[in-house]
């Protein structure tokens, strides 16, 4: 078997960090919107994404929009590196040429890499969510907060919400890959668009919409479970299904779609930034941009960089 190619891991990690930093304020509004309405956050402070951005910036300062950026970047350095690197490496175990890839292989590799990476990076996700939700109320450095969670809540505290996190990762990949492929094929067959960058952008935002619709209820439960400190007694939710049902019962069905707009608006640009950065060179990227193995011109460059 050929030696492991580290380029997808390195490029994937770099791309994920850039994408995370660029979309972080939008992600912060998603977290704030998702936690409001539950027990300790009964006051409805934000009416939507833009209202949350302006209110947080006005009341807490511009720096507050990047509360939790340190664990977020650490998460992407681990999660993004493992996810993108493992995804490409797994595909090479099944097929040696990109032309031989199938949707089943891509979805399977995407689900496995997404579940594995999100599980391993869960502690950084927990701290990121808490710093986003609590802002200045959570004092201290990133390492001191990691230690505090471990000392007060144990290992379970660091891996709180890991099951819905893994479920969300599987749902997003399982939905986005087929939708991207179907959207792109319909655009090409309609004759309205060629195999261009615009086609890639439209397909990315469309699959991001489908991924957000499918995963948002699980994402709400995941965010709330991670933000909850369980020092004694039982947790608020026993599991994903219990969390979904309780949220629906206590706050209504649409509470499961809190933070939907920032969730979707973050996924589209995030995919595009990752694709751009992973290819490293703008001119070459314009000729060879790829999204989860989609077949664009100049495949030789993609293979040389190790991106596909």
Image: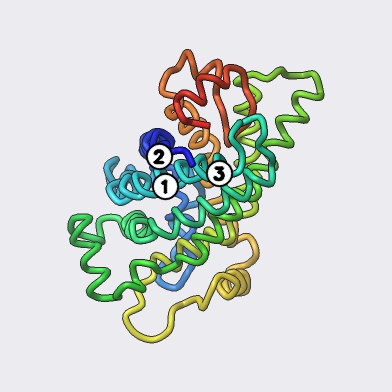
Q: Earlier in the sequence, mark 1 or mark 3?
A: 1
Q: CA distance from mark 2 to mark 3?
A: 16 Å
Q: Quadrant of residue 288?
A: top right
Q: CA distance from mark 2 to mark 1?
A: 6 Å
The numbered disc on residue 82 is: 1
Residue 50 x/y as whole percent: 47, 42
Residue most toward the bottom?
A: 233
Q: Which residue is mark 2?
A: 9
Q: Is residue 176 visible?
A: no
Q: Is residue 40 visible?
A: yes
User: Residue at (40%, 39%) from the top-left corner?
Assistant: 9
Residue most toward the top?
A: 283
- Circle 3 crowding by C-alpha within 10 Å: few under 14, some 14–19, many from 20: few
Q: Is residue 60 above or below residue 9?
A: below
Local SS, label 3: helix
Q: Earlier in the sequence, mark 2 or mark 1?
A: 2
Q: Is residue 27 above or below residue 142?
A: above
Residue 82 x/y as whole percent: 42, 47
Q: CA distance from mark 1 to mark 3?
A: 16 Å
User: Residue at (42%, 39%) from the top-left corner?
Assistant: 3
Q: Which residue is mark 3?
A: 93
The numbered disc on residue 277 is: none
Residue 298 horizontal side relative to residue 86, left or right:
right
Q: Is residue 72 above or below residue 191?
A: below
State if disc 1 and disc 2 touch (CB < 8 Å).
Answer: yes
Residue 232 x/y as whole percent: 34, 84
State if disc 3 and disc 1 touch (CB < 8 Å).
Answer: no
Residue 62 x/y as whole percent: 29, 40
User: Residue at (26%, 70%) from the top-left corner?
Assistant: 150
Q: Nearer the viewer, mark 2 or mark 3?
A: 3
In this view, the residue in front, 3 or 223, is 3
Q: Quadrant of residue 184?
A: top right
């Amino acid at each position: 078997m050929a030696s492991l190619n580290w380029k997808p891991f390195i490029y994937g990690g770099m791309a994920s960090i850039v994408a995370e930093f660029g979309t972080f304020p939008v992600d912060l509004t998603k977290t704030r919107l998702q936690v409001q309405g539950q027990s300790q956050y009964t006051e409805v402070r934000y009416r939507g994404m833009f209202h949350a951005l302006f209110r947080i910036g006005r009341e807490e300062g511009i720096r507050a929009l990047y509360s939790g950026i340190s664990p977020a970047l650490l998460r992407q350095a681990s999660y993004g590196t493992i996810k993108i690197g493992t995804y490409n490496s797994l595909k090479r175990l099944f097929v040696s040429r990109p032309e031989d890839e199938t949707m089943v292989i891509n979805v399977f590799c995407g689900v496995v890499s997404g579940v594995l990476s999100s599980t391993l990076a869960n502690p950084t996700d927990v701290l990121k969510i808490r710093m986003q939700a609590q802002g200045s109320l959570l004092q201290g450095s990133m390492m001191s907060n990691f230690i505090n969670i471990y000392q007060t809540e144990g290992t379970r505290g660091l891996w709180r919400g890991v099951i819905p996190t893994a479920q969300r990762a599987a749902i997003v990949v399982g939905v986005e890959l087929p939708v991207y492929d179907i959207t792109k094929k319909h655009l090409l067959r309609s004759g309205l668009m060629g195999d261009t960058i615009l086609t890639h952008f439209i397909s990315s935002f469309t699959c991001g919409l489908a991924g957000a619709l499918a995963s948002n209820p699980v994402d709400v439960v995941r965010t709330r479970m991670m933000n909850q400190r369980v020092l004694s007694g039982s947790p608020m939710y026993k599991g994903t299904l219990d969390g979904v049902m309780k949220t629906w019962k206590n706050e209504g069905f649409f509470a499961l779609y809190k933070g939907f707009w920032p969730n979707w608006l973050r996924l589209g640009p995030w995919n595009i930034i990752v694709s751009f950065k992973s290819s490293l060179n703008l001119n070459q990227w314009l000729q060879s941009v790829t999204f989860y193995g989609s077949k664009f011109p100049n495949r030789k460059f993609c293979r040389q960089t190790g991106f596909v």
